[in-house]
Structures are given as C-alpha cells and as structure tokens.
Amino acid sequence: MEKHLKEQLEQFYAQGKEHDSKQTDRLKRWRNIEPESALLITLLIKTKCAQNVLEIGTSNGYSTIKIADALRSTGGQLTTIEIEKERVAEAQKNLEEYKLSDYVECLHADAFDFLQTNKRYFDFILLDAERKEYVRYWPFLKNLLSANRKCLMVVDNVVSHANEVADFVAEIEKDETFKIIKIPVGAGLLFVGLDY
C-alpha cells in the first residue's frame, strides 16, 4: 500500500471510530474492522494471489477499500454485499475517492438472498455482518468453500462477540471436513477452510 493511501486510511478509520463513539444505537455505527485485522486479511489476499473475493458486510467501505487495494496488486475483483442502501452509496463514494471502484462490485442486497442464488466461485470470503444471521448463511457458505478447495473464509468479531457467534462456530465444528482456527487479532478472527 502506498504511503499516502495508508495515511489517508488511518484518518478514515479514526473518523469512523469518532463517529461510532457518538452513536447510542449500534446499528447507526460504521463498525469498521480493526486495522490490524484488515492488514492480516490483505496480506492473505496478496499471498494467495486471490482473484475473486466476497465481502459480506460493506458498511461505509473501510475494509472494502483495504481489500480493493490488495486486489489491485493481484488483478482480482471484489464483490461486496450490503443490505443498507445508504451504506452502499457511502462505500461507492469512498471507493471513487480512493480510485478503487474498478476493483469492486458493490451490491445492495440481502446476503441471504445473494447466497441462495449465487453461482459464482470465490477464493476468499470475509464475513463481517449481522452475526445473528450467520447460522442461516452457513449451508451456502459451506457450499462456496467446498466448491473451491483453496477458498478461505475469515469471520470477524469472534473474540469480542464470542457469545453471538457460538452457535455459528458450533455448526462449522459439526462438519469434520473443515478446519478452523481462531486468532486473537483485532476483535478476533476465525479462519475456516477445507481440511485437505
């Protein structure tokens, strides 16, 4: 990442944190992924030379920008899904500002609906949305992971909100074809991939 972009994104993140600190309603917060988590994710994307990345939960586009910048170096493409129309517009505006729109398809959609009808393959998935929905998503995410043996899924907030993702993690653990590992970076990241 170029130095000036890194500095701009540090300011972008700080502004998001300040915005969130003033919101009493959790749903009005941007709830951006922590910088150290974003760094690890982008390093993995670059190392894997990922070509097709799926992000579930765009918010205002902080993680989207970080991923798009990583994909600029791999020549890949990001599909990001957000249910709130205003957040999609905000993310698109931010992507344009950082000149990264060409690497991203922003979809205003319900992630469950998308996952039910999706026919695309992905080699990297970031799940950072409403945690109560994760168990419903799992059968479709499982199919995506199984369709591409090299696909890796990363789930955010598994330490900070452990209780809210416990059922989801238990569902994954029921299937011995998957390996999981929890890493205490940022709010906690869960890595999920096929055991092969």
Image (spheres, helix red, strand yellow):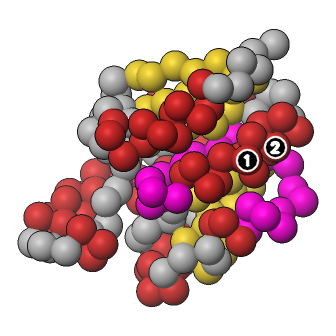
Cβ atoms under marks 1 and 2 closer than 8 Å: yes
Q: Which residues are magenta?
A: 114-133
Residue ID at (42%, 36%): 166
Residue 57 placed where, x, y %?
A: 51, 62
Q: Residues within 10 Å of mark 2 (few under 14, many from 20)?
A: few
Residue 70 placed where, x, y %?
A: 60, 44
Relative to residue 117, is residue 13 drawn left or right? left
Question: Type of residue at label 1?
Answer: Pro
Residue that badge 1 annotates: 139
Q: Quadrant of residue 32?
A: bottom left
Q: Residues within 10 Å of mark 1 (few under 14, many from 20)?
A: some
Residue that badge 2 annotates: 143
Residue 7 placed where, x, y %?
A: 30, 50
Residue ID at (19%, 59%): 17
SS at circle 2: helix
The answer to whether one can see residue 71 in this image is no
Residue ID at (32%, 40%): 163
The one of 141 and 167 positioned closer to us in this rendering: 167
| Pair 1/2: label in front | 1
46 up-or-down from 181: above or below? below
Residue 12 placed where, x, y %?
A: 29, 62
